[in-house]
Amino acid sequence: MAPHPQRRRRSEDRREQIIDEALKTFADNGYHGASIAEIAARCGLSQPGLLHYFPNKAALLAAVLDYRDRLDYDRLGFSQQLRGKDALERLAVLVEHNMHVPGLVRLFTVVTSEAVTTDHPARDWVVNRYRTFETYLAGALEDGITDGTIRPEVDTRAVARQIFAMMDGLQLQWLLEPDSVDMAQLFRAYVDGLIERISA
Amino acid sequence: MAPHPQRRRRSEDRREQIIDEALKTFADNGYHGASIAEIAARCGLSQPGLLHYFPNKAALLAAVLDYRDRLDYDRLGFSQQLRGKDALERLAVLVEHNMHVPGLVRLFTVVTSEAVTTDHPARDWVVNRYRTFETYLAGALEDGITDGTIRPEVDTRAVARQIFAMMDGLQLQWLLEPDSVDMAQLFRAYVDGLIERISA
């Protein structure tokens, strides 16, 4: 028998609330520093009550990262198959957007770096994310070579890796000093220089 | 009365050993995930034995970061007052060197990112480090403008921020996939492109 529609609705709302509070807690304290007890308390739940939805802290982190990923894939334009310089322009817009969602950026910065510690549950997720993004962006640049807007000798995978490195590094500096580091402007200047260098 | 020379020597050796083991433990587990008990055990000390040298975990992290800093300042050429492109070349050499000291790199990546979490004891250290490096490198680039090797319209502070962002981001990707990400080569390619763009 299917669950009562209203109960299902309430259960989904509860899952969303837990993911939302978990995201904030991981961003505040990192994965290692976050506790299920604290997340449960933020949700007004008992620990067993929360564990009914997510069996452990690692499963909760996975749910949070999946949620963040869906947002990013949309914003990166994965679904629109942007080509060549359009993909780079989109990234500059994404970085501007990120300045309005410091909590999400902080989650990402903390968890991706923490993933290099021993036995971190997000390590595979982080590695796959870089590979996926590299493949996506290198592909977009290859398309630019095909349509003659990007120089054929450009090492598209190397450029993709460099671009995500620049994004990550600027995010960290911005999180540390939001009032004096304008990451959107710094990234835009980098992308402009890059476009100049790789344009056919 | 001054302490007996041999006892002082033994005490200094012990401090070095503690810093060395603490560095590895922070790199393995992050600051939040590291425990004084584990560091003491690695040194063959009791907890009170270790706390005799460093009163708490934050003091121990500060000592580790100071140690790492001294290494970096030397390698960055702070003492030699490198000018213009020489400072950029030195950074490329530093990144090559870093591929041989993954433990130090991991410590840096984990702690600097963790510093954006709430109430992290290394936050001020990290913020000051970026400011110091920015000032140093922007100064070297200004010298390049003065001696006519760098174009006068270059925003030296922005370029300095971008360079350290690229270093940090590539370090993270390399730590995640040391076998497939050649951070020295990726950084070198970035610096070569940058030098081309800012040269007078």
Image (spheres, coloured by chain):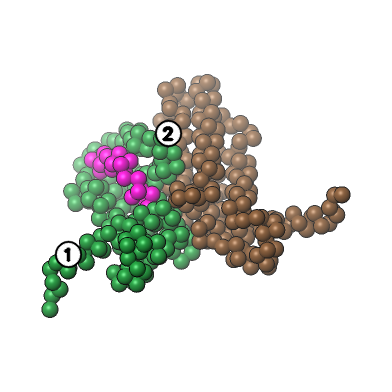
Chain colours: A green, B brown
The location of residue A71, given as percent across then percent down, is 25, 52
Question: In front of the other: label 1 or label 2?
Answer: 1
Side (left or right) of B119 relative to A146: right
The location of residue A182, given as percent across then percent down, is 38, 35
- Give residue A67's quadrant in the image: bottom left
Q: Which mark is residue B139?
A: none
- Which residues are the magenta region? A86-108
- Residue shown at 79% from the left, 55% from the top: B9
SS of the residue under disc 1: helix
- Give residue A66's quadrant in the image: bottom left
SS of the residue under disc 2: loop
Residue A103 drawn in magenta: yes
Q: Chain of mark 1?
A: A
- Residue shown at 53% from the left, 48% from the top: B122
Q: Which residue is mark 2?
A: A180
- Amino acid at pointer 1: Arg
Q: Which residue is mark 1?
A: A9
Q: Does residue A97 appear in this view? A: yes
